[in-house]
Image (cartoon, rainbow, N blue to C red):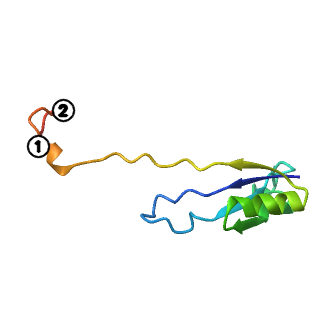
């Protein structure tokens, strides 16, 4: 039984950081998903895939995993690269692309 600990990224529909500050512990699938031959639905008998635990910090999640003897891996979040954009740069005379309408 292994798990991954990560901090989820914000969705593309968000402009703020709601629900992105807490850490999540999810179990890795132990059994592969199967396709139902009649209906075509994807299903699994592994119930641990449905468990998502939320923690305030990565230390709390790691402490929980070690206390319950769960193998884990921590996935560090990637920080967003911010590019400074200035509106007046659109009208510079030395633009790389010419201004067209």
User: Residue tagged by mark 1?
Assistant: 91
Image quarter for residue 42? bottom right
Contact? badges 1 and 2 (CB < 8 Å): no
How far apart are the two marked residues, 1 and 2, measured between alpha carbons? Answer: 11 Å
Q: Is residue 1 left or right of residue 54?
A: right
10 Å crowding of disc 1: few (<14), some (14-19), many (20+)? few
Earlier sequence position, callout 1 versus callout 2: 1
- Asked if residue 22 is positioned above or below residue 32 in the image, the reply reads below
Badge 2 is on which residue? 97
- For the question of whether residue 93 can be seen, the reply is yes
Q: Position of residue 61 (x, y in %)?
A: 75, 61
Residue at image location 43% in from the left, 45% down from the top: 81
Pointer 2 local density, CA inside 10 Å: few below 14, some 14–19, many at least 20: few
Question: Which image quarter holds the C terminus?
Answer: top left
Q: How many marks?
A: 2
Residue 44: give its label: none
Can the viewer see residue 45? no
Q: Tell me where residue 13 appears, x and y as whole percent.
A: 45, 62
Q: Nearer the viewer, mark 1 or mark 2?
A: 1
Q: Quadrant of residue 52?
A: bottom right
> Going 56% across and 56% down the picture, which residue do you hit?
9
In this rendering, would 1 be left or right of 82? Answer: right
The local secondary structure at tag 2 comes to loop
Q: Quadrant of residue 96?
A: top left
Q: Position of residue 64 (x, y in %)?
A: 82, 63
Residue sitting at 83 percent across and 48 percent down? Answer: 32
Residue under the image location 51 percent in, 49 percent down: 79
Task: Between residue 39 and residue 30, name the one nearer to us.
Answer: 30
31 left or right of 6 in image: right
The answer to whether 99 appears left or right of 72 in the picture is left
Dot 1: element: helix
């Amino acid at each position: 039984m292994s798990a991954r600990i990560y901090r989820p990224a914000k969705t593309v529909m968000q402009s703020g950081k709601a629900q992105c500050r807490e850490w999540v512990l999810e179990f890795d699938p132990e059994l592969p998903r199967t396709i139902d031959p009649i209906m075509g639905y994807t299903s699994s008998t592994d119930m641990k895939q449905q468990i998502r635990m939320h923690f305030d910090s990565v230390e709390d999640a790691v402490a929980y995993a070690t206390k319950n003897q769960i193998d884990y891996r921590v996935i560090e979040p990637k920080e967003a690269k911010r590019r400074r954009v200035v509106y007046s740069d659109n009208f510079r005379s030395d633009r790389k692309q010419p201004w067209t309408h």
